[in-house]
Amino acid sequence: MGLFDFLTKGEEKPVEPTAKPAAAGATDFFGGNNAAPAAATGETYTIVSGDSLSKIAKNHYGDAAKWHQIYEANKATIGANPDHIEVGQVLTLPKI
């Protein structure tokens, strides 16, 4: 479509977006249930180089001291040492 095609066609209405399915019974492309489990109702965050739990808490919650909540929600992923997080790990950021 060229510039002059638009001018000669006149005004067209934009395409309306389709309705999204309700989150409670939502399914993914393959028909599986993609509803979040009760423990993972917060957002997720993928660790990048230079991150620390306190930096993530400061950026997400506005308070670096809330890193403890992130650690408690992700002990299984992080392990026993909260200072040892690795690039690429996906953490759940709990709702506070």
Image (tube, rainbow, N blue to C red):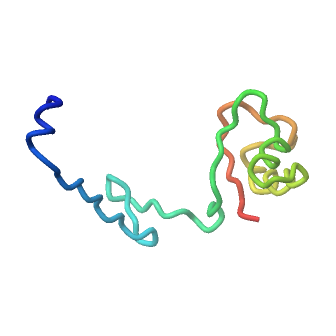
Residue at the image point whose x is 71% and y is 63% from the top = 95
Q: How many marks?
A: 0
Residue at the image point whose x is 13% and y is 31% from the top = 4
User: Vertically, is 89 above or below 62?
Assistant: above
In terms of image quadrants, where is residue 42? bottom right
Q: Position of residue 30 (x, y in %)?
A: 32, 53
User: Vertically, is 52 above or below 27?
Assistant: above
**Extreme right residue here?**
65
Residue at the image point whose x is 68% and y is 47% from the top = 91
**In-image side of 7 versus 91 (left or right):** left
Q: Position of residue 26 (x, y in %)?
A: 40, 65
In terms of image quadrants, where is residue 88? top right
Q: Nearer the viewer, residue 29 or 52?
A: 52
Q: Nearer the viewer, residue 37 or 67?
A: 67
Check the picture and name the quadrant holding the N terminus. Answer: top left
Q: Position of residue 29 (x, y in %)?
A: 33, 52
User: Vertically, is 23 above or below 60?
Assistant: below
Q: Nearer the viewer, residue 94 or 85?
A: 94
Residue at the image point whose x is 40% and y is 70% from the top = 22
Q: Position of residue 96 (x, y in %)?
A: 76, 65
In terms of image quadrants, where is residue 36? bottom right
User: Vertically, is 59 above or below 35?
Assistant: above
**In-image side of 78 versus 39 (left or right):** right
